[in-house]
């Protein structure tokens, strides 16, 4: 850039001299400066330096363009990877939800089967079966217990077990 400035300054001085001579009516002297060998050399040097700068700018622009394309490709790749990652996450989520739902349904069916079997055994047993929770509340009272104790299931379920104990023993309980 300094070389260009020096060349421009020299050429500008010559151009200024040419204009002064031309205004003074000395056109031939002005043309001689412009056509002089030294003037042409300076003009050519100026053009060469200017062309080098233009070429360097074009090269820099080409590099920037390539970097821009590389950056765009990288951004596109990152966007695609993000999309793939989110898609996989959604697919895995639904697979796990389906497996969980399927397992839950299997467990629910097993529970229903066990519960049905439990109630069938409980209600068909000849022996009296009473289930009392930790607070002393009757939770289950089967048909055998109804026959033995004379209470209906609807009368005792949810009541304290003390109601089943006869009076002399009831006070000790």
Image: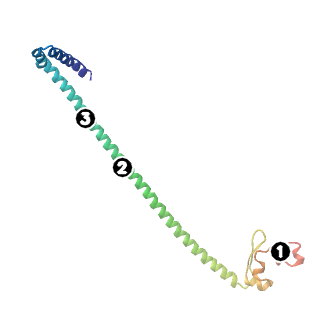
Q: Earlier in the sequence, mark 2 or mark 1?
A: 2
- Give the numbered dot on residue 162: 1
Considering only vertical position in the picture, is 52 above or below 84? above
Quarter of the image that includes the N terminus: top left
Considering only vertical position in the picture, is 47 above or below 61? above
Residue designated by label 2: 77
Q: Nearer the viewer, residue 77 or 51?
A: 51
- Which residue: 90% across, 77% down? 168
Q: Nearer the viewer, residue 116 or 5?
A: 5
Give percent across and percent down for residue 11.
Answer: 19, 19
Mark 2 and mark 1 residues within 8 Å of each other at the beta carbon: no
Give percent across and percent down for residue 140.
Answer: 73, 77
C-alpha distance separating marks 1 and 3: 100 Å
**Secondary structure type for disc 2:** helix
C-alpha distance separating marks 2 and 1: 75 Å
**Dot in front, 1 or 3:** 3
Label 1 crowd (10 A; few <14 / some 14-19 / many >=20)? some
Label 2 crowd (10 A; few <14 / some 14-19 / many >=20)? few
**Secondary structure type for disc 3:** helix
Q: Report the side of 15 relative to 152 (left or right).
A: left
Quarter of the image that includes the C terminus: bottom right
Residue designated by label 3: 59
**Dot in front, 2 or 3:** 3
Give percent across and percent down for residue 91.
Answer: 45, 61
Q: Earlier in the sequence, mark 1 or mark 3?
A: 3
- Give the numbered dot on residue 19: none
C-alpha distance separating marks 2 and 3: 27 Å
Give percent across and percent down for residue 32.
Answer: 10, 16
**Secondary structure type for disc 1:** helix
Q: Earlier in the sequence, mark 2 or mark 3?
A: 3
Considering only vertical position in the picture, is 40 above or below 66? above
């Amino acid at each position: 850039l300094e070389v260009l400035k020096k060349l421009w300054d020299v050429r500008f001085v010559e151009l200024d001299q040419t204009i002064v001579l031309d205004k003074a009516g000395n056109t031939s002297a002005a043309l001689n400066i412009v056509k002089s060998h030294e003037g042409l050399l300076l003009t050519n040097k100026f053009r060469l330096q200017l062309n080098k700068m233009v070429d360097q700018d074009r090269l820099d622009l080409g590099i920037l363009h390539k970097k821009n394309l590389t950056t765009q490709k990288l951004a596109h790749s990152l966007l695609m990877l993000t999309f793939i990652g989110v898609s996989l996450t959604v697919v895995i989520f639904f697979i796990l939800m389906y497996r969980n739902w399927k397992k839950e349904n299997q467990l629910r069916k097993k529970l229903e089967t066990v519960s049905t079997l439990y109630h069938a055994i409980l209600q068909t047993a000849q022996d009296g079966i009473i289930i009392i929770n930790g607070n002393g509340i009757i939770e289950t009272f089967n048909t055998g217990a109804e026959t033995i104790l004379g209470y209906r299931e609807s009368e005792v379920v949810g009541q304290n077990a003390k109601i089943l104990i006869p009076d002399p023993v009831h006070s000790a309980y």
